Image (cartoon, helix red, strand yellow):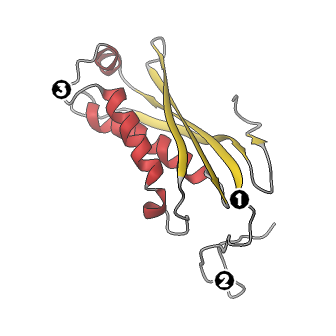
């Protein structure tokens, strides 16, 4: 497999996708933030002074996915047809899991948009809660699944989908 973001001289380039077929594409990325019990309870009870954390983080994640092309130099501008942020809270571990599902009909995939969306959403949780605790940990960000394009469907074998 060759790296497509480099030309024959090793220079960085944006991949030309003009000859690729337009197909329906979807990607799902996941990540987690581990917080203290105080932060967890404040999020769950909607007692953070900056507002409803998960609602704001959802909006931020969607905005992040839509602006991926502005953040990652070789990403294409895509017309997203769906971007959804979902949350799962675990009171036993004080972990908040985030997933970002992105869709488009296009000539290139939406994996980077899903990964950016989940990352920005989790960073927003951190930003909104850092006054209570700066020791939160963001991690386990990964592409869980992708569909469409020449390579078809991929499910990350190391992770549950």
Relative depth, front residue between 10 and 79: 79
Q: Earlier in the sequence, mark 1 or mark 3?
A: 1
Residue 153 located left or right of residue 74: right
Return the residue found at the far bottom: 9
Q: Is residue 74 above or below residue 51?
A: below
Q: Secondary structure at mark 2?
A: loop
Residue sitting at 64 percent across and 43 percent down? 27
Residue 125 in view: no
The location of residue 83, given as percent across then percent down, is 51, 40
Task: Tell me the tag on residue 123.
Answer: none
Instruction: Using the rendered view, name the quadrant where residue 101 is placed.
Output: top right
Relative depth, front residue between 44 and 55: 55
Q: Is residue 40 above or below residue 28?
A: above
Task: Tell me the tag on residue 10.
Answer: 2
Residue sitting at 31 percent across and 21 percent down? 39
Disc 2 versus disc 1: distance between alpha carbons? Answer: 28 Å
Return the residue found at the far left: 49
Residue 75 located left or right of residue 21: left
Give the class, few, some or many, for how many residues have Cα within 10 Å of label 2's Cα (few <14, many ≥20): few
The quadrant in which the C terminus is found is top right
The location of residue 30, given as percent across then percent down, is 57, 36
Q: Earlier in the sequence, mark 3 or mark 2?
A: 2
Q: Is residue 9 above or below residue 109?
A: below
Query: Which residue, given by chain and number where applicable, does mark 3 sit on?
Result: 49
Give the class, few, some or many, for how many residues have Cα within 10 Å of label 1's Cα (few <14, many ≥20): some
Residue 156 in view: yes
The location of residue 156, given as percent across then percent down, is 73, 39
């Amino acid at each position: 497999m060759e790296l497509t973001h480099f030309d024959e001289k090793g220079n960085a380039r944006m991949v030309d996708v003009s000859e690729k077929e337009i197909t329906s594409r979807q990607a799902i990325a996941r990540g987690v933030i581990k917080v203290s019990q105080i932060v967890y309870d404040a999020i769950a009870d909607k007692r953070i002074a900056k507002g409803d954390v998960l609602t704001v983080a959802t909006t931020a994640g969607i905005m992040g996915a839509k602006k991926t092309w502005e953040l990652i130099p070789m990403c294409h501008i895509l017309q997203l047809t769906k971007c959804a942020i979902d949350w799962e809270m675990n009171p036993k571990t004080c972990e908040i899991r985030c997933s970002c599902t992105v869709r488009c009909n296009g000539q290139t995939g939406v994996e980077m948009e899903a990964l950016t969306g989940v990352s920005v959403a989790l960073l927003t949780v951190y930003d909104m809660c850092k006054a209570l605790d700066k020791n939160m940990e963001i991690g386990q960000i990964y592409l869980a699944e992708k569909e469409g394009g020449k390579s078809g469907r991929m499910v990350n074998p190391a992770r549950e989908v």
